[in-house]
Image (cartoon, grey):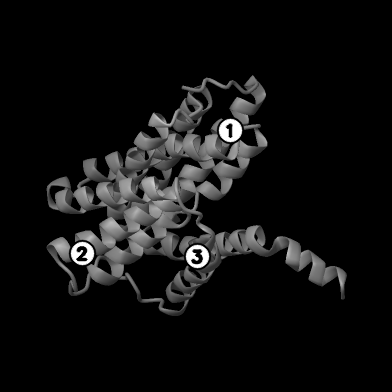
Amino acid sequence: MDWFVVSPLVAGLLFFVAMLAAFIDSIAGGGGLLTVPSLLAAGLSPAQALATNKLQSVGGSFSASLYFVRRGAVKLGEQKLNIAMTFIGAIFGTLLIQHLQADILRQVLPLLLIAIGLWFLLMPRLGEEDRARRLHGLPFALLGGGCVGFYDGFFGPGAGSFYALAFVTLCGYNLAKSTAHAKILNFTSNFGSLLFFMFGGKVVWATGLIMMVGAFCGARLGARLVLSRGQKLIRPMVVIVSAVMSAKLLWDSHGSAILAWLAGL
């Protein structure tokens, strides 16, 4: 168990970073783009940053999930199979990432995120209203829950967008309803991954708990806007977040090559 402590000023900044990240995450996903670099800048090791980020993510996704359930946007009884498959997928993903490198995903993921952003941008009626469902029961639970949960445990960035996209395209839900259901599965995979990070002793609890409180507050505000503003808010946020995540991941993978190319011009 790691009780690494940051200064009060840094702790306060991380609180507000977590609040902003959870607000964004509850609407479109991608909050980890803010929290992980902030944790690294605060002095945590990469392993500590990833583990502690899962702790604060659990706070944010739980807050949003609780709000959606209480408002009747999600019926938990109908999601039992999806939740179970997501949890199992997240556990396997978290176990596998400890033995394999995620380099291939780092190369492919920016293209997937760009595709998601373009899909929402070029199809303005996507998720506007409920449509006929394409997958039911176990097939959807395995694909929309287990596979995305595995990805969230193995790598993570953009998982919220993938959950929402699965509900829109495979379940036929409108965008607001899909986002609400996505947070339930996002919380499930975050919680499953956190359990194994806890066993590894990498979670920085003092910092993570402070950020978790901030994430709880930010996610609650974002969840309210999802139900009140719906598609008008979610669609542009998904497009923007997908573009920013793609640029960040491309820079992380090819930043030095890009700088060398620019220097040669």
Q: What residue type is labelled 3?
A: Leu
In this orientation, which residue lies closer to the viewer: 93 or 29?
93
For disc 1, the marked residue is 14
Label 3: how many residues lie within 10 Å, few (<14), some (14-19) or many (20+)?
some
Does residue 225 appear in this view? no
Alpha-carbon span between mark 1 and mark 2: 37 Å
Amino acid marked by disc 2: Phe
Mark 3 lies on residue: 109
Q: In which quarter of the image is residue 38?
A: top right
Q: Which of marks 1 and 3 is nearer the N terminus?
A: 1
Quadrant containing the C terminus in the rendered view: bottom right
- Decide if residue 254 is on the left or right side of residue 80: right
Out of 149 and 213, give the one closest to the viewer: 149
Is residue 52 depicted above or below 103 in this figure?
above
- Give me the residue at 53% from left, 42% from top: 20
Q: In this view, does 29 lie above or below 170?
A: above
Judged left or right of residue 103, residue 192 is left
Q: Is residue 198 left or right of residue 9?
A: left
Mark pair 1, 3: CA separation: 27 Å
Where does the image place residue 223, in percent across and percent down from the top left? 37, 47
Mark 1 residue crowding within 10 angstroms, few (<14) / some (14–19) / many (20+): many
x then y, percent, for residue 130: 23, 69
* Residue 228 x %, y %: 35, 53
Q: Mark 2 points at which residue?
A: 140
Instruction: Give the residue drawn at x 36%, y 51%.
Output: 93
Q: Nearer the viewer, mark 1 or mark 2?
A: 2
- Residue shown at 45%/35% (left/top)? 56
Residue 227 in the image, given as x and y percentages of width and height = 32, 52
Residue 47 appears left or right of 120: right
